[in-house]
Image (cartoon, rainbow, N blue to C red):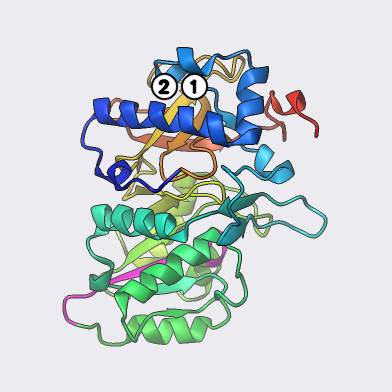
Amino acid sequence: MEFKEKQFEITSEESFIHQALEIFRNQYEHNKIYNTYVDMRGVKAESVTRLEEIPFLPIEFFKTHDVICGNAPPQAIFRSSGTTGMERSRHMVTDLSVCRHSLQKGFSRFYGPPEDVQFLALTPTPEQGPDSSLIFMIQHLMDLSLSPENGYFLTSYSGLTARLMQRRSPGKKVMLIGLTYSLLHFAEKYPGDYGPLIVVETGGMKGRRKEMTREELHSILSEAFRVETIHSEYGMTELLSQAWSQGNGLFSTVPWMKALIRDVNDPLSYVETGQTGGINIIDLANQYSCSFIATQDLGRLHENGQFEVLGRFDASDVRGCSLMSY
């Protein structure tokens, strides 16, 4: 399988479906884990003609199997965060250029060229989190930005305050992006009017803080930073693309990414727009692993194709994982 630039040039629903079906058949042929899963679901790959007919791989498989196409050695392995003793997901990335292309093109679609943005991160540094897909994303955006004012401030709130208060570079947007619990902690300690600022939270308390609703969280952050809206990034170890929310918790996907909402009681069926269910993600940037992921997130699809995340499944395992045990 060779990287195909045309995946990032999708301009219509028809071309998305065509590309998705082509990648599905390629991954069925080249991905041993996905091939076995599809077969055990009783699906004939050659008979699949609609997105809804494609089997979505439960995200838990990334904890127990190497979900990868072919035998090429990975250029990187992204791993999910987790406490000691917790089994972590791993994403074998055969071609990092696909990852870089996806995040750069996707970010630019929502915020303009990274060169026009100064990035301030409330996350670990690349040295502290060498296998984090989130930190890889942030560092790549910083590399593209080339702003000397970029930086990581998870261990230096005073340094972040000083950086936020200093004079801005002409024409540069300032984006503060961080782990949700860190943004909340900083907002409580150092609230203030820091001027025009894009605040992006990346979701979840990771067990560090009591979980709260999106409305509560965004209200606290908006008031602390004196901004009208709080932005959000939806991404995960198992994906190479991101969805972005520029307010109200509604996520928009890039053209090569799509969210579908499955029935919580029947994972092979889908609910109508506006109803709550499990979030299935198609990420065509995942060409060398699996593009069809059944996440553990609960969500709702809106008429315009945007989606919102409402929480997570109570059960830790999605039905289907027990089909394979090797």
Residue 222, label in figure: none
For the point 52% across and 52% down, which residue is it?
203
1 and 2 marks in contact (CB < 8 Å): yes
Dividing the image into 4 quarters, which one contains the C terminus? top right
Most foreground residue, 4 or 271: 4
Q: Does the magenta stretch include residue 173?
A: yes
Q: Residue at x 60, y 22 (%)?
A: 38
Gap between marks 1 and 2 measured at Cα: 5 Å
Residue 13 falls inside the magenta stretch: no
Q: Residues within 10 Å of mark 2 (few under 14, many from 20)?
A: some
Say what amino acid the circle numbered 1 marks: Ile
Residue 144: give x, y in percent of width and height: 32, 72
Secondary structure at badge 1 equals loop
The residue carrying mark 1 is 54
Where residue 195 sits: x, y (%)? 27, 74
Any part of residue 299 in sight: no
Region of the chain picked out in magenta, as a range: 170-182
Q: In this view, does 26 lie to the left or right of 207?
A: left
When the figure is inspected, residue 39 is found, relative to residue 19, above or below; the finding is above
**Label 2 secondary element:** helix
Q: Where is residue 70 in the image (x, y as percent from the top left)?
A: 58, 43
Q: Which circle marks residue 51 in the picture?
A: 2
Return the residue nearer the eye: 48 or 252: 48
Looking at numbered disc 2 in the image, what kind of residue is underneath it? Answer: Leu
Up-down relation of residue 140 to residue 234 (above or below): below
Q: Which of 23 and 236 is in front in this view?
A: 23
How many numbered discs sit on the rendered protein? 2
Residue for point 40% across, 15% down: 49
Extreme residue in the right direction: 85
Picture quarter containing residue 164?
Answer: bottom left
Residue 79 vs 27, above or below: the answer is below
Q: Can residue 188 be seen from the camera position used here?
A: yes
